[in-house]
Image (cartoon, grey):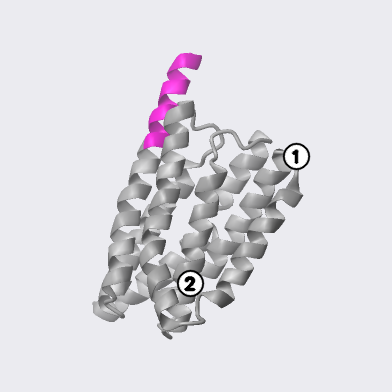
Amino acid sequence: MGPGLLWFCHWSTLGVCAALKLPQISALLAARGARGLSVPSLLLELAGFLVFLRYQCYYGYPLLTYLEYPIIIAQDIILLLCIFHFKGNVKQAAPYFAVFLSSWFVLTLQKWIIDLAMNLSTFISAASKFAQLQYLWKTKDSGAVSALTWSLSSYTCATRIVTTLMTTNDLTILIRFVIMLALNIWVTATILHYRKMNTVKTE
């Protein structure tokens, strides 16, 4: 049961993450605009993912426990470029990418830097969810935001709680996934709430 469950959680997470942001990118392209999407939320999410990936690599954790992160980061970069494209200036993304790239090397200059960054990354990732929630509350419109993407994110957090408990048992990572699961569910529920409200108004 244990090895089978672990195998299922690892590979289902990878499978889901391979297409995680595709519904969001598709919704964005269909709407031909970034209505409802928060750029600060996406940037904070990218920062949190980058730190998490670097932390796992630094401590040599099993590859299958974090293999989805390069995939998600690549999808987030595409999403960010699409948003800047629809806002009319793709070049605005360049300074952010320069900061992220330099951070990859700075994070592991000292052990205390990567440990501190990992602890802060939970707050950074939580802040990204709150930034999206705040944007939804402010606009009262879920626009091009994909509820499917956020619900898939909830699933991956749930499976990663299981794999963390069964492999590294790293408390810092475990706390991160529990918090992210709760916030992803909250964002999904908020998107669906405003979508329902706007559908009623249209009718």
Q: Amino acid at mark 1?
A: Gly
Crowd rating for badge 1 (residues with CA inside 10 Å; few <14, some 14–19, many 20+): few
Residue at the disc numbered 2: 53
Residue at the disc numbered 1: 88
As for residue 25 lying within the magenta part, the answer is no
Image point (43%, 71%), residue name: 11
Crowd rating for badge 2 (residues with CA inside 10 Å; few <14, some 14–19, many 20+): some
As for residue 199 lying within the magenta part, the answer is yes
The span picked out in magenta is 190-203
Q: Quadrant of residue 56?
A: bottom left
Q: Amino acid at mark 2?
A: Leu
Mark positioned earlier in the residue sequence (1 or 2): 2
Majority secondary structure in the magenta region:
helix
Residue 90 horizontal/vertical position (percent)? 74, 48
Image point (53%, 58%), residue name: 46
Q: Are marks 1 and 2 in contact (CB under 8 Å)?
A: no
